[in-house]
Image: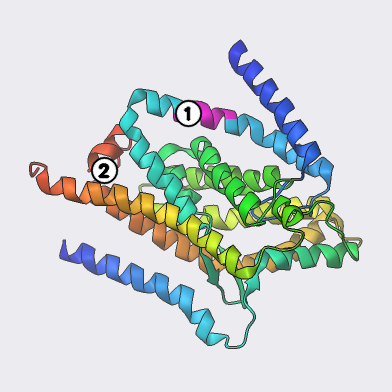
Amino acid sequence: MKKGRITVAALVIAALLIALIPLFALRGAEFGGSDDAGSVMVEEITGGYEPWFTPVLETILHGELPGEVESLFFCIQTGIGVGIIAFVMGRFVERKKWMPKE
Amino acid sequence: MSKKHMKLTAALAGFSLAFCVSTTVSAMHIMEGYLPPQYCIAWGVLCLPFLVTGFLSIRKKLEENRRNITLLAMAGAFIFVISSLKIPSVTGSCSHMTGTGLGAILFGPSAVSILGIIVLIFQAILLAHGGLTTLGANTFSMAIAGPLLSYGVYRLCKKLSVNRWVSVFLAAFIGDLFTYCVTSVQLALAYPSEAGGVWASVGKFLGVFAPTQLPLAVLEGILTVLIMMALEAYAKPELKMIGFHREVK
């Protein structure tokens, strides 16, 4: 069990490092989305491309979704996911205490 | 394929055609309106057989045992969380992971197509991320091609009796990268370069996506291993129920 804990801790640290190192290593970088970068490449290849369809939400709002609201929606998405995982895992963990030892 | 299945597939094809004509396809994550209509339709239609198989396989799993829904929900929630996290990468731009590896390992690739498309629709409608018109192409890359390879890699590793955690890592890692390779090819097919044609374009798009995605694919591998460890420690009965018992000792 102890060995398992060390592995888990090491993996968590590795994950955090991968996610955070670029932020500090590349100070001043823009960190835009790579999806946008893809769109820029489309424009480069075709020499100016007009998307033939705008997102439904933008049509309704007559403009882009405000950045803050977009992050709200992203948070909702994360929240839904984390909620389900935490709920189910919580039940599993509690249940194990009550299960007969193998 | 039985007659009922054929009819279902045909109906779905018609529906998706209508859907694609009126809107556009969004990929993981080709932006809304960035793929010509005929490609949107083609990718959408290509997804249908997978989605139908996925639907049937999920229904079968649930008919076998209602309680399988817990793990299914976990796999879906994992995709929800993972694909909502935008992580800064070494290239100075952000991208996010797919999270489809876990579902592919647990339930097989077809079931993931359904889980994946739910997330994609959520993002396309609320976040203008990907898009409805590019939904077919995005579903194909993120919810079908990636998981399919993940599943293949996992099976292969098992055959070669590679360490199980290494197999899980590799499956998620390669599946994530492959998703973006497919996206590159999808974009390149629609936008071949003047010099060099489709393959030159594939190179260009890969040049945009691959370096950004590489560290994130490693991250996805690690996270998938972590959640699998948690599941094996606490959810053995459920893993056995979905037919995963051979791997769990």
- Identify the residue at image location x=53%, y=45%: B147
How packed mark 1 is, by other alpha carbons closer than 10 Å (few <14, some 14-19, many 20 or more), is some
Examine the residues drawn in magenta and state their main secondary structure: helix
Q: Going by the image, does B72 lie left or right of A30?
A: left
Label 2 sits on a secondary structure element that is loop
On the image, numbered disc 2 is attached to which residue?
A: B248
Do the residues at discs 1 and 2 belong to one chain? yes
How packed mark 2 is, by other alpha carbons closer than 10 Å (few <14, some 14-19, many 20 or more), is few
Does residue B102 appear in the picture of this structure?
no
The amino acid sitting under disc 2 is: Val
Whether residue B77 appears in magenta in the rendering, the answer is: no
Give the x, y percent position of residue B242. Answer: 34, 34
Label 1 sits on a secondary structure element that is helix
On-image quarter of the N terminus of chain B: top right
Q: Is residue B243 above or below residue B136?
A: above
Whether residue B56 appears in magenta in the rendering, the answer is: yes
On the image, numbered disc 1 is attached to which residue?
A: B57
- Identify the residue at image location x=55%, y=39%: B113
Q: Nearer the viewer, residue B104 or B71?
A: B71
Give the x, y percent position of residue A52. Answer: 84, 52
Occupied quadrant, residue B223:
bottom left
The amino acid sitting under disc 1 is: Ser
Query: Which colour style is shown?
Result: rainbow
Q: Label 1: chain?
A: B
Alpha carbon separation for disc pair 1 and 2 = 22 Å
Q: Is residue B42 above or below residue B5?
A: below
Give the x, y percent position of residue A7. Answer: 27, 66
* Part of the protein shown in magenta: B52-58
Q: Is residue B29 above or below residue A96?
A: below
On-image quarter of the C terminus of chain B: top left
Q: Which mark is residue B144?
A: none
